[in-house]
Amino acid sequence: MYIALRYRAQYYFVIVFQLLFFNIGTAKELNVAVSQTLPPYVLPESNSGIEIDLFREAMALKGYEIRPFYVPFARLSTSLKHEKTDVALTLQIDPNLTGVHYSQPYIFYRNVVVSLKKRQLQIDKIEDLKQYSILAFQNAAIFLGEQFHNITKTNRKYVEIANQQNQVHMLYLERVDAIIMDEKIFHYFRQQEPEQYRKEAINIHPLFVPIFYHVGFKDEKLRDAYDNALNTLKGNGRYQEIINSY
C-alpha cells in the first residue's frame, strides 16, 4: 500500500513538473476590450471581477493569457475594429457588426427597480413607473424593451446617468423615487454607502427579463475554443464558484 502511494505521488509530481516546465513562456496573449465600470462584473483597479475571472480561467485552459484594456461600455463592439484588439466582453449580438464571432451566452445581468421600503411605492409592473422619478443606468431606455422605452419618452422625471454609484447614493438621499440597475451592481455599491444607509430596508421590483451577453472574437476558432472551455468550467462547478465569490 505504501509503495503504491509513493509511486502514485511520484507520478503526479512528474506530471505537474512537465506542465510547469514546458508551459513556461508558451502562453499566447490576447488583448481584451472590457467595460470601464461594471463592478462586480469588472474591477479595473485589480484586473478582476466576475467576467474577467471567467474569461481568464476559460482561456487559460486553452493556453492563453489575457491583457485587459478598458473602454466605455458603448465602445466595446467598435473596439473590435482596432487591429490590436482580439476580443471584447459584454456584447449583445449586432447583425450590423461584420467580422465578429459571438460566443454562447456567458453571463446575464438582471436589471431591477430598487426603492426604499419606507416609501411603500406600488411598483408591480412596468406601467407603474410612469408616475415616479426614476434614475436609470446609461442607455437603459434602449436595453430594457419597447414598453419601458415608451414610458421614458413621456416621463419627464426619468433620467439616465453613467455613474451607477451615484444612482445608489441618490436613492438613499431620497432625491429620486427609484433607481434601475443590475441587482449585483446595486448590492456592490450599496456596501460602499455609509452604515446608516446600508441598514435602510429596500424593495426589489423584478420587472425586467435578464439580459444575456456574449464574448465577441475576431477569430472563429478562438471562439470555439472559448465555448469549449466555458462548458468545462460549467461542468466542473468552477463557473458558479467564480460568480458566487462576488
Image (cartoon, rainbow, N blue to C red):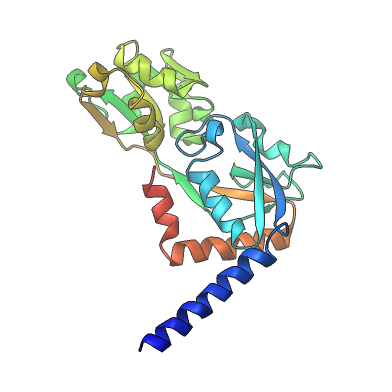
Q: Residue 210 appears in which quarter of the rendering?
A: top left
From where the camera sits, is residue 210 visible? yes
- Rendered location of residue 90, percent (x, y): 57, 42
Q: Is residue 210 left or right of residue 197?
A: right
Identity of the residue drawn at 47% across and 44% down: 50
Q: In the current view of this chain or complex, which residue is farthest to the right?
A: 83
The mark tally for this picture is 0
Q: Residue 79 appears in which quarter of the rendering?
A: top right
Query: In the rendered view, would you say 190 is above or below 213?
Result: above
| Quadrant location, the N terminus | bottom left
- Rendered location of residue 155, percent (x, y): 42, 17
Q: Is residue 244 left or right of residue 231?
A: left
From where the camera sits, is residue 132 visible? no
- Rendered location of residue 124, percent (x, y): 26, 33
| Quadrant location, the C terminus | top left
Q: Nearer the viewer, residue 29 or 177?
A: 29
- Rendered location of residue 180, percent (x, y): 39, 27
Q: Nearer the viewer, residue 105 or 141?
A: 105
Identity of the residue drawn at 24% across and 27% down: 202
Identity of the residue drawn at 79% across and 42% down: 84
Q: Is residue 84 left or right of residue 38?
A: right
Q: Nearer the viewer, residue 18 or 220?
A: 18
Query: In the rendered view, would you say 185 is above or below 172?
Result: below
Q: Is residue 34 left or right of residue 39?
A: right
Query: In the rendered view, would you say 122 is above or below 56?
Result: above
Q: Residue 31 appears in which quarter of the rendering?
A: top right
Identity of the residue drawn at 72% across and 63% down: 221
